Amino acid sequence: MPIAGLLNNPVFWGCIIASILAQILKLPLEYLRTKEWDWSLLFGTGGMPSSHSAVVTAAAAGIGHYAGYDTPLFGLAIAIAMVVVYDATNIRRQAGFHAQQINQIFKEVFTGKAKAIEEYQELREVLGHSPAEALGGIVLGILVSLLTWVIWP
């Protein structure tokens, strides 16, 4: 019966919907920014809005709606959301900056050796989110949670 309970859980579905919407919204928003379609964003990390921020915010807001904003569970959900958003905007973003620098160093070291550059596989540079991207995920998470709460009281 645990699976049936999960499938009948509005907070769970709010998280799933927030995650899927965040990934789908990355496509047109990135297109508006770059004028190029990047289909890898459907399954990748980084970009606007932050799916990590959307999921943990939908979970926290959903727990608040259904369990109460004055419960220890809501407090825990907020704490976890704060850690995830901090990680997305700081630690993972810094890892992306490091990858950019390492890629630049390799390009400088191998200048003039086109074959070596072609064989080199670039590190992934977009790992984290800007504060605006995280905020986009937070707003999306809250909106999805509110919509779920209205539809499924």
Image (cartoon, rainbow, N blue to C red):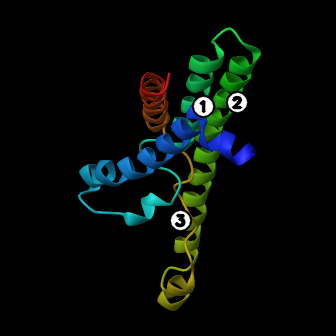
**Relative vertical location of residue 87 with respect to residue 113 in this rendering, above or below:** above
Marks 2 and 3 sit apart, C-alpha to C-alpha, by: 35 Å
Residue 39 badge: none
**Residue nearest the observer in this picture, 148 or 32:** 148
Considering depth in this image, is 9 or 29 the residue closer to the camera? Answer: 9
Front tag of 3 and 1: 1
Categorize mark 3 by other alpha carbons within 10 Å: few (<14), some (14-19), many (20+): few
Q: Under tag 2, what secondary structure? A: helix
Residue at which label 2 appears: 80
Q: Earlier in the sequence, mark 2 or mark 3?
A: 2
Q: Quadrant of residue 88?
A: top right
Instruction: Kindly identify the amino acid type of the residue bearing the numbered disc 2.
Output: Ile
Amino acid carrying mark 1 in the image? Ala
Residue located beneath label 1 in the image: 59
Real-space CA distance between mark 3 and mark 1, rounded to the nearest whole angstrom: 39 Å
Percent x, y for residue 126?
52, 55
Residue 104's tag is 3
Label 2 with label 1: CB-CB less than 8 Å:
yes
Viewer-nearest residue: 141 or 38: 141
